[in-house]
Image: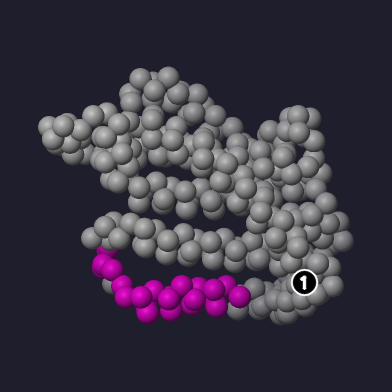
Amino acid sequence: MRPLQPIGRGPRIVLGLGFFVLFVAAWAAATLGGFVPGTFLADPLTMVQDGWLLVTRFGFLSDIGVTVWRVLGGFVLAALVAVPVGVLMGAYKPVEAFLEPFVSFARYLPASAFVPLLILWAGIGETQKLLVIFIGSVFQIILMIAVTVGGVRRDLVEAAYTLGAGDAGIIRRVLLPATAPDIAETLRLVLGWAWTYVIVAELIGSSSGIGHMIIESQALLATGQIIFGIIVIGLIGLVSDFLFKGANRLLFPWKLA
């Protein structure tokens, strides 16, 4: 094992699964061995039983669907706004000078701090939850894409101008192809952050969703249900991450070269 030395796909899968096995084993030893009371941390078997009851008797699948819809809805709205703004900021320095201070300021504002205001403005319906995810995602995407586009090699731009390209052609034929894989990677990363925002949105004034189930389970001290909800979020995020990576490999094969 040497620094930065790559490993094969098989060893990578084995090592990745190995950590999960060790984690569950340590969890089981701590809870089933009596070192941690079940009131504070349910054991793996209780978690599985509580999860099965949630799915079969309490309609948890519909809660999952609602939460996924909220994440995707807010994230897509943020991406539709942030991608073109980020490209313009990266491509044109006057636009960057105009917007970058505000975007840098706004990205440090926690989305959860807007929840009381959003409830006043939009109520406790779906709009409020979508806006929480939008606010938490849009400024991060804008700034990361602006940095990516602004870092394109200058010699590529100069070569395109020499060949007769105009400003619009530079963006369409040089900047976007050069940065599209990194833009997609930015969206993949921020989608993971969006999951943290939706749970915050669902903890207040919600009657459905995974976050709503978690807060209700807290009142009942049902730690098994809480852990099951957290694990479901992680699994959905992991699946979406793999799907994003697969799509990126198909759409941008030159990035692998």
**235 left or right, relative to 149:** right
**Whether residue 162 can be seen here:** yes
Query: Is residue 204 toward the left or the right of residue 156 in the image?
Result: right
Q: How is the image coloured?
A: one colour
Is residue 191 depicted above or below 2 in this figure? above
Q: Residue at x 26, y 57 (%)?
A: 254
22 within the magenta span: yes
Q: Quadrant of the N terminus?
A: bottom left
> Is residue 102 shown above or below 56?
above
Q: Residues within 10 Å of mark 1 (few under 14, many from 20)?
A: some
Q: Quadrant of residue 49?
A: bottom right
Residue at point 66%, 54% (across, down): 69
The total number of labels drawn is 1
153 drawn magenta: no
Q: Is residue 50 visible?
A: no
The residue beneath circle 1 is 55
Magenta-colored span:
2-24
Mark 1 secondary-structure assignment: helix
